[in-house]
Structures are given as C-alpha cells and as structure tokens.
Amino acid sequence: MVGFDPFKPIEFDGFKIMKNIFIMTKSKKIDVHGTEILIYSEKANEYISLTDIARYRDAERSDYILQNWMRNRSTIEFIGLWELFNNPDFNSIEFDGIKNLAGSNSFALTPKRWIETTNAKGIVSKT
C-alpha cells in the first residue's frame, strides 16, 4: 500500500494497534489494574492474551466475553484490516462474508472459527 508505515500504529474506531501486536510460547506477565495479563512471544512477534483481558470483566465466563466481542461489526472490521495489512494468505472473500453477517442477532463467531475460515494469523487460539 502506498504510504503505509508498518511501525506507525493503526487507528480504528478509538483503538490503536502496533503492527505485530495482537494475540502464543515464551511468556511474560504484566499487571493491568490488578489483573495479570500474559504476553506470549513467538519469533519476533508478541501476542497479548485476550482471554486474560476478558477475565477482568468476568472471570468465570471469559469465553462468552470473547464471543460477544467478536460478534461486533467494528471488531470484525478492525481485525480484518489488520490481517489485510499483515497477512498475505488472509482469505478476504471469507472475511467479506463474515463482515456482512457481523452484528446481526443470529451471528456468532469464535476465535477458532475466525482463524479456520479466514486463515488469520493475528489471533491465535490455544483451545
């Protein structure tokens, strides 16, 4: 893309993300408002545990928190944009189908389904 700087944060819907930060085997921990969040490293990339962030909201039902987050159209557009910039193997045709369904009452999406359907690399599922 013309003018794309991979080291400049991407801003989308009030969120900022650096090129190689999203959601893996060596880990370190950070404390955020009393909640321990794991940061996994693999090769030159670091991944933040979304499950740990969701546990801050509801420790017993973090999986539901993630599913609800991934139902949101803005979330789908954001992670899809990240994949388009950073993943040459991203399946943009499947992404368009998911994006069109996002936000509807019957729409449900898990991280695992997102990864398998779109060949996503920015989110890693440990289950």
Image: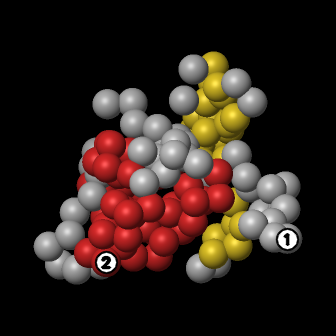
Count of marks, rendered view? 2
**Closer to the camera in the image, 93 or 24:** 93
Q: Quadrant of the N terminus?
A: bottom right
Q: Is residue 64 left or right of residue 36?
A: left
Task: Write down the residue under mark 2.
Answer: 100
Question: Which residue is situated farthest in the left direction here?
Answer: 106
User: 89 or 82: nearer the eye?
Assistant: 89
User: Residue 40 lies in what quarter of the image?
Assistant: top right
Count neighbours of disc 1 (C-alpha within 10 A) and say few if under 14, some if 14 to 19, many if 20 or more: few
What separation in Å lies between label 1 and label 2 (alpha carbons)?
28 Å
Disc marking residue 3: 1
Q: Secondary structure at mark 1?
A: loop
Circle 2 Cα neighbour tier, 10 Å, few/some/many (<14 / 14–19 / ≥20): few
The image position of residue 82, as x and y in percent, is: 60, 59
Residues at circles 1 and 2 in contact by the CB criterion of under 8 Å: no
Dot label at residue 96:
none
Query: Quadrant location of residue 9?
Result: bottom right
Q: Residue at x 43, y 67 (%)?
A: 76
| Label whose residue precedes the other's in the sequence (1 or 2) | 1
In the picture, which quadrant includes the C terminus? Answer: top left
User: Which amino acid, mark 2?
Assistant: Asn
Mark 1 residue type = Gly
Q: Nearer the viewer, mark 1 or mark 2?
A: 1
- The residue sitting at the top extreme is 26
Name the secondary structure under disc 2. helix
Residue 104 vertical position relative to residue 93 in the rendered view, above or below: below
Question: In x, y percent, where is residue 69?
Answer: 38, 64
Residue 29 visible somewhere in the drawing: no
